């Protein structure tokens, strides 16, 4: 019985591997990783250049922390993450590193990003109820929606971990009515992304 169960599990894994290979999922992930590397390198390079020749970034972050309330900063980030991820999360991660409680505020930022994705998911669900809006979005996000239909949870995992707008993936998941409970589970990897990035950014600022 145990051998049969293991055999079935291996067969399922093999079939999934063949499916993702055939549909181009691995190629998509690799291209996404390559695209993600450049913005990260540019961001780090810009931080180092600005810190050396323009202004003291550490002092600037301390000033921001002393000038604006944490609630206000996190609220701005939440709004950004709910609306297509307009502001790079790395800026807010750097801010949390200079706050009074870095881990606490980093966790709140991760939570804000996660909840922003949930809002985006429901925006996608709402769009399907308005034909004109739905048609317009279907055209603009055609490839993303197509990929979400093909790869489902795995694409949500990629969106949660890689530096691509998580809101776009969440909206696409809402449009195709991806199971909400599964979306919430896969989206938890958003926390992993923030903690991993903080390991690098906290050392820089």
Image (cartoon, helix red, strand yellow):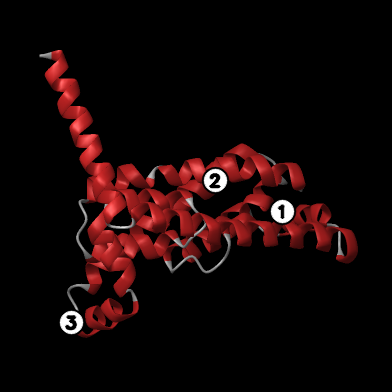
Could you tell me which residue is drawn at 52 percent across and 56 percent down? 163
Frontmost residue, 47 versus 76: 47
The answer to whether 195 appears left or right of 5 in the picture is right
Q: Which residue is more in the foreground, 43 or 132?
A: 43
Picture disc at residue 131: 3
Residue that carries the numbered disc 2 in the rendered image: 194
Query: How many residues crowd mark 2 within 10 Å: few (<14), some (14–19), many (20+)?
Result: many
Closer to viewer: mark 1 or mark 3: 3
Q: Nearer the viewer, residue 84 or 126?
A: 84
Q: Secondary structure at mark 3?
A: helix
Residue at coordinates 65% horizontally, 39% vertically from top-left? 199
Mark sitting earlier along the chain (3/2): 3
Q: CA distance from mark 3 to mark 2?
A: 36 Å
Among the two numbered marks 2 and 1 on one chain, the one whose residue lies closer to the N terminus: 1
Residue positioned 54% across, 45% down in the render: 194
* Image location (x, y in percent) of residue 147: 30, 62
The quadrant of the picture occupied by the N terminus is top left
């Amino acid at each position: 019985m145990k051998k049969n169960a293991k055999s079935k599990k291996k067969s399922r894994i093999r079939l999934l591997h063949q499916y993702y290979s055939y549909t181009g999922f691995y190629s998509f992930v690799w291209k996404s990783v390559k695209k993600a590397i450049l913005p990260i390198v540019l961001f780090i390079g810009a931080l180092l250049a600005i810190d050396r020749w323009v202004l003291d970034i550490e002092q600037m972050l301390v000033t921001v922390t002393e000038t604006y309330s944490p609630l206000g900063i996190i609220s701005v980030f939440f709004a950004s993450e709910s609306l297509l991820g307009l502001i790079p999360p790395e800026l807010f991660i750097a801010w949390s590193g200079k706050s009074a409680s870095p881990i606490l505020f980093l966790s709140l930022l991760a939570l804000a990003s996660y909840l922003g994705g949930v809002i985006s998911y429901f925006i996608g669900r709402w769009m399907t109820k308005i034909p004109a809006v739905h048609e317009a979005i279907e055209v603009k996000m055609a490839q993303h929606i197509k990929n979400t239909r093909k790869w489902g949870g795995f694409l949500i995992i990629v969106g949660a971990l890689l530096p691509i707008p998580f809101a776009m993936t969440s909206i696409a998941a809402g449009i195709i009515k991806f199971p909400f409970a599964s979306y919430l589970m896969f989206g938890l990897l958003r926390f992993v992304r923030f903690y991993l990035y903080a390991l690098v950014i906290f050392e820089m600022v």
